[in-house]
Amino acid sequence: MDKPTSYAAEFNLDKNIVYLNHAAVSPWPVRTRNAVIQFAEENSRFGSLNYLQWLETETALRKQLQSLINAPSHLDIALVKNTSEALSMVAYGIDWHPGDNVVITDQEFPSNHIVWETLASQGVELRTADITNDKKTPEQCIFDRCDLHTRLISVSSVQYASGLKLNLPQIGQFCKLHNILFCVDAIQSIGALRFDVQQCLADFVMADGHKWMLGPEGLGFFYCASHIREQLKLTQYGWHMMEDYANFSVQHWRVAQSARRFECGSPNMLGIHALHASLSLILEVGMAEIEHRLLGNTRCMLDEIIQQENLELLSPADMDRLGGIVTFKHKYHPPRVVYNKLRQQNILCAERGGGIRFSPHFYTDPEKIRTAIRLANIISE
C-alpha cells in the first residue's frame, strides 16, 4: 500500500508520536482545529450575529451524515450528545411488554448492554449470544438466541476490543423476516468503513463523532428509520423538538415529524462546526479510498504480528471479519506492562480485551505501525 503522503498536511501530530488509538479518541484534522478557532473568534467578536449561517452549517452536517450512511433523507438524522444517549432513546422509547427479550453479543461495549439490563424492571429479558467461544458464525450465535418473543437485536458493527466485524445485512434480513427491530452501534465503523443503512436494513443506527469520524467528543448522530420514528415514545422535551421550533410563542405545538423530535434543546454549535469540518475531509477523500487504505493498514498489522515470535493475535485472522482494530498480546508479559512501555515510546494505543489494541486510520504510515509492533515484541520488564 502506498504511503498516504497526500493527506499528511491534514494532520499536525507531533512527529515523535505514533498514533494508533482512533478507536478511542482521534486527533483532529488541521481543518477541524481551524474551524473551531474561527468559530471561537467569530463568537467572541460578534456573538450570535451570524446564527442563521450557523443553522446552515447544522443542516449541512445532517446532509454529510446522510451521505456517510446512505440514509434516505437528512431529516432521518438527529444530532445527539453521544452513542449512549441514542441507545437510551431506543431502549426507553419502545413500548415493551413483559416477556419481551433483547439479544446482544458477549463482546459489546458497556453502553450496549447496561441500557438493556435496566429494562429488567419492565419484564424485558436480556439474552447474550456467545460469539467468543461458540464455533458457529457470530451471526448464527445471535439468531440462536432469538425466539418468538425477541423484540430487538442490538449489536456493534465492529466490536471495540476484538475488532470483529459483523455481517450486518445478514442480521438485518433475519430481523425483517422475523419482525424484530434492528439496532446498530456503529461507532467503530462510521468514518472507517463504508456503511449503508438501507443495505443492512437497520431501524436504528448511532455513533459518536470522536473516533473514526475525526471529530470532537460530545456530538454524535442518531438515525431512526422514518417508518418507526413515531412509534418511539419521547423521553425528553424542549423547544427544539417542536415542528415550528422558531416560534417561541406557540401555544399548541406539535412534535417535529423529522428526527429532530429527539433533540430537546439548544444544539452544540461549536461541536457542529468541528464535526462538519472533519466530515468534509472524510467525504473529500471518499469512504472507498479510506476503507481501502485502512484495510491495508489492518493487513499490515496482521502480517507483522504473525511474524513476531513473542506476540499472539487476539483479533480474528480473517480480513473479512476486520475493520481498523487489531488486538494482540505478549506471550510473556501482561498487557499493562506492554502498554506502559509503548506509552514511554510515545506509541498511543489502548489496553483492551486482555491485550493491546492498535487502531490506526487511513492516513497512518504503515512503517510506523510495523515499528510499533516490533517494539511490542521485544519489550522486557
Image (spheres, rainbow, N blue to C red):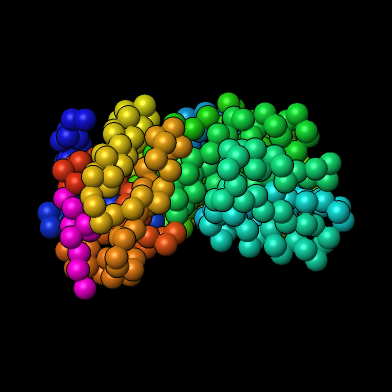
Locate the C terminus and report the quarter of the image it occupies: bottom left
Q: Residue at x 23, y 50 (%)?
A: 308
Please report the residue visible at 80 percent of the width from the left and 43 percent of the height from the top: 147
Could you tell me if residue 363 is visible in this image?
yes
- Foreground residue among 325 and 25: 325
Relative vertical location of residue 19 with respect to residue 180 in this rendering, above or below: below
Against 2, is 331 above or below? below
Image height of 3 relative to 43, above or below = above
Residue 95 at x, y percent in the picture: 82, 50
Residue lying furthest right in this view? 98
Where, by quadrant of the figure, is residue 278 drawn?
top left
- 205 to the left or right of 355: right
The residue at the far bottom in this view is 381
Vertical position of residue 157 compared to residue 120: above or below: above
Residue lying at the far left of the rendered structure: 15
Main secondary-structure element of the magenta-colored stretch = helix
Tell whether 247 sits left or right of 94.
left
Q: Percent position (x, y) of residue 49?
A: 40, 51
Horizontal placement of 373 versus 109: left or right? left
- Residue 43 placement (x, y as % from top left): 35, 57
For the record, the magenta segment spans: 371-381
Residue 353's spot in the image, x, y percent?
A: 44, 59
Residue 280 in view here: no
Quarter of the image with the N terminus is top left
Residue closer to the observer: 6 or 142: 142
